[in-house]
Amino acid sequence: MLTEASIQAMAGTRRDLAALGALGALGVLAVVFLAAAPWIVSSYDYAVFIPCLLVSGAITIAATALSASVPRRTGLMLILVLAAVMRLVVVLEEPLLSTDIYRYIWDGRVQAAGINPYLYVPADPALASLRDAAIYPNINRAEYAVTAYPPVAEMFFFLVTRISESLTAMRLAMVACDAAVILLLVRLLQTLRLPLTAVVAWAWHPLVVWEVGNSGHVEALMVALLMAGVTLLVRRRALTGAVMVAFAALAKPYAIVALPAFWRRWDWRLPLVVAATVALCYLPYAGAGRGALGFLTASGYFAEEGFIAGDAFWLVGLAQNIFGVVPILTVAYLVAGMAGLAWLALRVSARAERSPQAMLEEIAVLLMAGLFFLSPNYAWYFLAVVPFLALCARSPIAVPAWALTLGSILLYRPIFLPDNDLAWKTFAALPFVVAVAWTLLRRRTPEKTYGASEWTS
C-alpha cells in the first residue's frame, strides 16, 4: 500500500525526470545548431547565422531558469557533458567570427625565435623566415600593426605554441581556461550555497561556446584569471585576488575596472602590489621601450577603431548623428564617463563590510558600466560579464547582464540590414538600456504590503 510519503516521493521523481528531460532537450537543440552552423553560413551567410545565435541565447536563458529545478548532481553532469560536446563540435571548424587566433600563434612563433613581438609588424622583412602558408596569410593588420596584446597574453601564446603552432592547440588551450572558469564557478556556487547547475549560464552561453571554442579568443584566459581573483576575494584574500585581476588586465586591459572591488580606501598595499605586478610582467619585453604598448596606443588601435574621433563610443556617435559634429563632445563624454566610473569605484571601495553576494554584484556592475562606457566594437569583449549570470542569477542585475551579453551578438552585424556600425551598436545597446531602466524602476517602486485581513479574505 502506498503511503502519502511514497506518493510524494514518486511525484518528486517524476518532476525531476521531466526537468532533466527538458534541460537535456534544450542542450541537444543547442548542439544541433552548432553542428549545422557551417552549413548555415555557407548556404545563407551570416544573415541567418546571427539570428540563430540569438535563439541560442534564448535557449541558455531557458536552461538557466530550469537549472534550479533539476537534481544537483545529475543535472550538473548533464550540463557539463553537453558543454563538452558543444565545444568539441566547434573546435575543429574553421573560425567563423574572427581571425585573431592567427595573430596569437604568430606572436608565439616570433617569441620562440627570440624576437620581441612588440618590435616588428608581421610583414617586416626581419620576420620573413617565420612566414608560412597556414598562419601568416591570415594575420589581420599584418602590414602595419605590431601586436596589441599585453605581456601575460604574450607569455600564454608562447607557452601554447611550444606545444603546437596550430589552431586546434590554441583553441584547446582557451577551452582549458574555459574549463577553469567552470570549475571556479562551481566552487563559488557551492560556497554561496546556490544551485551548482546555475553554471549552465556560462557553460552553454553562445558567446562562450563560439568565442572560446571556435574563435579561441584570449578573453578565455582573462576571464579565468579574473574569476580566480574573484574567488580569492570571496575567501577574504583581497590582496592576492587583486594580483590575479592585474594578471587578467595584462591579458585584456579592460579587466582593470574590477579592481576597485578589491580595494579599501587608504590601503596603499593594493596599488603598490598591482604596480609591481605590471612592471614585472613587462620586464621581459622592456627592450621594446615605449613600443611595449604595441598597437594598443592612441595612434594605433584606439584611432583605428574610432575611439579618438569619438565615433566608437555609442552615445557620442548617436549624438553626432543627430546634432552633427561637436568638437568637444568626445572630450566631454570621456570626462563625464571617467567621473562616473570613478564615483562608482569610490562607492564600492568605501563599503566596510560586504557579503560575498554583494561583492559579486558590485564587480558585475563595474564591468557592465565599464563596457557600456567603452562600447566596444566586438562581441567577445562582453565575455567578462557572463560568469556573473550564474553567480547573480537571482539578483536584480541578472536582467541587464543577460541583455548586455546577448545584445552584443548584434555587433556581428548581419547583412540583411545596412552595414551601419552606429545602427548595429544601437540595436546591441538598447536592450541593456531598457533592462537597466526597468531594474531601477522596480527598485524604486515600493512593494505592496498585505495585512492579515487581505491574506485571509
Image: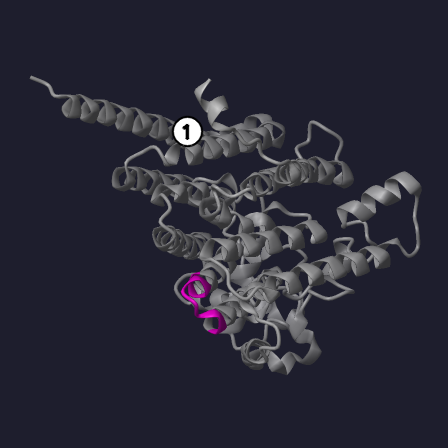
What residue would you read off at disc 1? Answer: 32
Q: Measured along the vertical axis of the image, is residue 340 above or below residue 262?
A: above
x and y percent of residue 34 in the render? Answer: 45, 34
Give above or below for 78 relative to 327.
above
Magenta stretch holds residue 234 = yes
Residue at x-position 35% and y-position 49%: 193
* Viewer-closest of 14 and 454: 454
Q: Magenta stretch? A: 231-239
Magenta span: helix, strand or loop, mainly?
helix
Label 1: few (<14), some (14–19) or many (≥20) C-alpha neighbours in 10 Å: few
Q: Is residue 351 above or below residue 219?
A: below
Q: Where is residue 254 in the image (x, y as percent from the top left)?
A: 62, 60
Q: Residue at x 63, y 65 (%)?
A: 147
Q: Where is residue 220 in the image (x, y as percent from the top left)?
A: 49, 55
Q: Which residue lies furthest to the left in this view?
A: 1
Residue lying at 76% horizontally and 61% vertically, measured from the top left = 339
> Residue flagged by tag 1: what amino acid is it?
Val
281 sits to left or right of 24: right
Residue at the extreme front: 453
- Give 140 or 177, whichever is nearer the viewer: 177
Q: How many labels does the image show?
A: 1
Q: Say which element carries label 1.
A: helix
Residue 307 is inside the magenta segment? no
Would residue 7 be seen by someone viewing this image from the given angle? yes
Q: In which quarter of the image is residue 448?
A: top right
